[in-house]
Image (cartoon, rainbow, N blue to C red):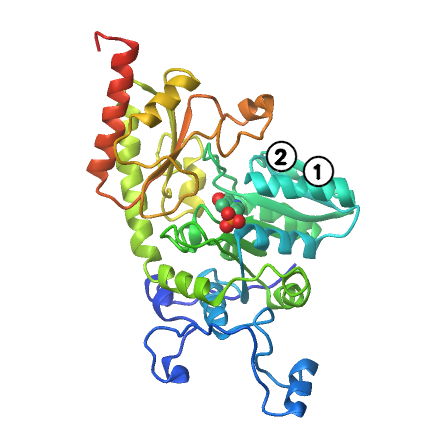
Amino acid sequence: MMKNKKKRSIKMDTMVIHDGYDANQFQGSLTPPIFQTSTFTFESAEQGERRFAGDEDGYIYSRLGNPTVRILEERMAQLENGEAALAFGSGMAAVSAVLIALTKASDHIICSQGIYGCTFGLLSMMKEKYHIHTDFTPMETEEQIRSLVRPETALIYVETPINPTMKLVDLELVVNVAKEYDIPVVVDNTFSSPYLQQPLTIGCDIVIHSATKYIGGHGDVVAGLVVGPKDFLDEVSVTTQKDVGGIISPFDAWLLLRGLKTLPVRLDRHCSNARKITEMLKEHPMVSKVYYPGDPDHPDYPITKKQMKQGGGLVSFEIKGDKQDAQKFLNMLNFIPIAVSLGDAETLIQHPATMTHAVVPEESRLKMGITDQLIRLSVGLEAWEDICDDLKQALDELAKMKNPAY
Ligand SMILES: *Cc1c(COP(=O)(O)O)cnc(C)c1O
């Protein structure tokens, strides 16, 4: 339906550092300046008129555009291999701007089975208020998706890997069906970042990120990004971005530009640490299941090989025991913080059943594989030996509590 850019030969490790910025345009400043300003002055009344009429390029007011934010948007468009990008004040501001822009009352959405909790909340609200119905499907076969298509289907929304059980959706399969019916495919690429997975290159139309996670990478900013065709993003920028107003601050855009420079370096480490930790967990007698897309034993490993560069930084696992045992295990960790969010330098651990997925009714939760024993780990950048040791000592303690002879 929509066109995105052709692939360039320059490597991503270089793009994250240079793309979208020309120091010569900013007095030679090596790093992009922070334009901490709400508005921009005009040289004359006539210039103001021309800017508002769109007859002259230039800034007007920071909700409509800001130079620091623009640099981030240009860099992100290149990284996701898209025509254009827009930055937002949170991942959810990005998700809502896209969903509202693509739909009208009584439309229909096809969505992957597991999605971020607040995206689910937004879809529920759209159903109540605007009669926009969403069908959820595991998207395992083309037929599964095709059988749900209706004349009023406005978009297909996909998250892969799916949080927290790390099931994957084959994006090529989704694109095949979407192209038949000319329906745009929107992918929340937060868990992979453009370094590990590029949905636009596969033929999807729009990519969304919670930049709070791997793009920022340091746990110090909440932000969102959308990448896609210029026509569509031009429309979003003058409608759901300008008039709903979930914009990013220039300082937060600057933090993301700084975070992006190390994205490939960080992701390589997140992924290699995650592989080591997966190996340790698979061997431990207190662990009954391990879910990691980079594990050759993962049922969706062929999809990982097909569309991801590496398996990512998230590992989920089930311990032997019940909810109380899961909580005891978390409490016995020495340095790994108990926290939601992901993609930070710090390894973070959380209990989906009582935290990120607490609002999901128990029956649906269990159907999604989110048991009381399931733990989600966002593997950080610490030495993998130290992360393993901490997990292992808490698992060993738990084993001793349950079986003193251990
Ligand atoms: C965190 C997250 C979001 C929401 O992003 P915020 O920046 O917290 O608003 C959306 N999708 C996924 C997959 C996420 O992990």
Q: Mark 2 and mark 1: span between their CA atoms?
A: 9 Å
Q: Check residue 148 in the rendering and tell me which mark sits there, or answer none.
A: 1
Residue 322 vertical placement versus 175 (above, below): above
- Identify the element where label 1 is drawn: loop
Quarter occupied by the N terminus: bottom right
Residue at x 36%, y 29% (from the top left corner): 297
Residue type marked 1: Leu
SS state under label 2: strand
Looking at the picture, tell me which residue is in the foreground, 188 or 62.
Answer: 62
Q: Residue at x 63, y 52 (%)?
A: 96
- Quadrant of the rendering where the C terminus is positioned: top left
Q: Is mark 1 within 8 Å of ligand 1?
A: no
**Closer to the camera in the image, 10 or 342:** 342
In the image, residue 360 lies at what x, y percent?
A: 58, 29
Residue type at the position of mark 2: Thr
Instruction: Decide if ligand 1 comes within 8 Å of the CB at mark 2.
Output: no
Query: Label 1 neighbourhood size at 10 Å, few (<14), some (14-19), many (20+)?
Result: some
- Residue 369, percent from left and from top: 50, 25
Residue ID for mark 2:
137
Q: Relative to 2, is 81 on the left or the right?
A: left
Residue 288 picture quarter? top left
Q: Residues within 10 Å of mark 2 (few under 14, many from 20)?
A: some
Left or right: residue 362 versus residue 355 is: right
In front here: 308 or 375? 375
- Tell me, yes or no, if residue 326 can be seen here: yes
The residue at 30%/11% (across/down) is: 402
Residue 29 x %, y %: 34, 79
Give the quarter of the image for residue 205: bottom right
Left or right: 184, with 310 as reference point? right
